Image (spheres, rainbow, N blue to C red):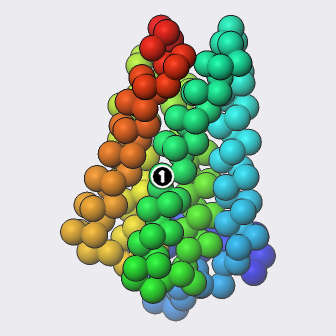
Amino acid sequence: MNPGHALSTAFKIGTARKLQPGDTDDSEQIGWLYAIVGIVLLVVVQFTIFVVASGGLTINEFRDLSIVMLISLGAPFVIFLVAALMTGKMARLPAAFFYLGILLSLVQIVSLIVQNISSGSSFILGATVVLVATAARGFLKFGWVGTLVVAILVAAAIIGAGFLLLQLPTGRYLT
């Protein structure tokens, strides 16, 4: 599958849009290479933003914040992996990872802009939860209950990662 077709397929299914007559759901044709591309893109974007925005942090503070970001951004992928295993939709998982990697990268970039205007933490949480919940409807074919469970789990993981920062040695000293 070529990159353009993989991208359009991932976004059609990830946004949970109804397929038009004649369209096919080719999400199972998207391979793990695309999933890795999405995840690597997210890591590169987050690392770049983090390094640029973290001027003046000590190595220990940088390490602790990196742990929290890894948990926050990794949670949707782990939740999707578990949900795909439970529902037998593993063939659709690479497409979901590709979609999540690209979308969460965009959320991180937009959140950087929003944080320059105002406090963007609620924006990041809300945008991530909505995008992941919508992707659960599209890729995993969840109804409203399953979608709500995924949304709550992602929100809890992100909020929990924030509380984890307070427990890490340098987290208590960050201002």
The foreground one among 83 and 134 is 83
What percent of the width, then of the height, locates residue 74? 54, 51
- Residue under the image location 58 percent in, 36 percent down: 67
Instruction: Please say whether residue 170 is visible from this viewpoint.
Output: yes
What percent of the width, then of the height, locates residue 171? 49, 19
Asked which quadrant contains residue 37, the reply is: bottom right
- Residue under the image location 61 percent in, 18 percent down: 61
63 displayed left or right of 173? right
The tally of labels here is 1
What percent of the width, then of the height, locates residue 101? 61, 55
Residue farthest left in this picture: 145
- Residue under the image location 76 percent in, 70 percent down: 33
Q: Secondary structure at mark 1?
A: helix
What percent of the width, then of the height, locates residue 21? 46, 89
Structural crowding at the residue carrying mark 1, measured as other residues with C-alpha within 10 Å and reported as few (<14), some (14–19) or many (≥20): some
130 displayed left or right of 58? left
The foreground one among 150 and 12 is 150
Q: Which residue is mark 1?
A: 75
| Above or below: residue 59 compared with residue 26 | above
- Residue under the image location 75 percent in, 81 percent down: 1
Q: Amino acid at mark 1?
A: Ala
Asked which quadrant contains residue 57, the reply is: top right
Asked which quadrant contains residue 69, the reply is: top right
| Above or below: residue 45 compared with residue 64 | below
| Above or below: residue 72 compared with residue 82 | above
Instruction: Please say whether residue 15 is visible from this viewpoint.
Output: no
